[in-house]
Image: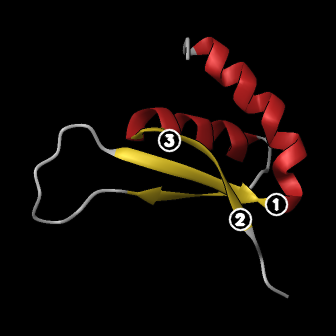
């Protein structure tokens, strides 16, 4: 059986990691894809957060609340 993920959030590494921790506390598995490239000095890393398709309904209200908390 193939596991499918959907991108649900994109922001700086710190912001994405905090959201990932919130999801982990709720036993929602997620993955982060980083745009960091070795050999390049970039100060604003952008990460993308992916969740399992089966968790999309559970994740949406959590993301909306998180965005309110961080004023997005």
Labels 3 & 2 near each other (Cβ < 8 A): no
According to the picture, the residue beneath numbered tag 1 turns out to be: 53
Labels 1 & 2 near each other (Cβ < 8 A): yes
Q: Mark 3: which secondary structure?
A: helix
Name the N-terminal-most of marks 1 and 3.
Answer: 3
Name the N-terminal-most of marks 3 and 2.
Answer: 2
Name the N-terminal-most of marks 1 and 2.
Answer: 2
- Give the quadrant of the C terminus: top right
The tag on residue 72 is: none
The tag on residue 5 is: 2
Give the residue drawn at x 87%, y 42%: 58
Q: Pinpoint residue 29: horizontal percent, then vertical percent.
A: 72, 57
Other residues around mark 1 within 10 Å, as few (<14) / some (14–19) / many (≥20): few
User: How many angstroms separate mark 1 from mark 2 (CA)?
Assistant: 5 Å
Give the residue drawn at x 10%, y 64%: 39
Q: Mark 2: which secondary structure?
A: strand
Q: Pinpoint residue 26: horizontal percent, then vertical percent.
A: 79, 42
**Quarter of the rendering containing residue 63:** top right
Give the residue drawn at x 26%, y 37%: 44
Residue 55 is left or right of residue 6, and the answer is right
Query: Which mark is in front, 3 or 2?
Result: 2
Q: Pinpoint residue 61: horizontal percent, then vertical percent.
A: 82, 29
**Quarter of the rendering containing residue 9:** top right
User: How many angstroms separate mark 1 from mark 3 (CA)?
Assistant: 19 Å
Residue 3 is left or right of residue 31, and the answer is right
On screen, 72 above or below 19? above
Q: Mark 1: which secondary structure?
A: helix
Residue 5 is left or right of residue 59, and the answer is left
According to the picture, the residue beneath numbered tag 3 turns out to be: 17
Q: Pinpoint residue 69: horizontal percent, then vertical percent.
A: 62, 13
């Amino acid at each position: 059986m193939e596991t499918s993920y959907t991108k649900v959030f994109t922001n700086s590494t710190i912001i994405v990691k905090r959201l990932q921790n919130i999801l982990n506390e709720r036993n929602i598995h997620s993955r982060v894809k980083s745009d960091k490239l070795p050999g390049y000095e970039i100060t604003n890393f952008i990460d993308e957060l992916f969740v399992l398709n089966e968790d999309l309904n559970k994740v949406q209200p959590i993301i909306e609340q998180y965005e309110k908390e961080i004023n997005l």
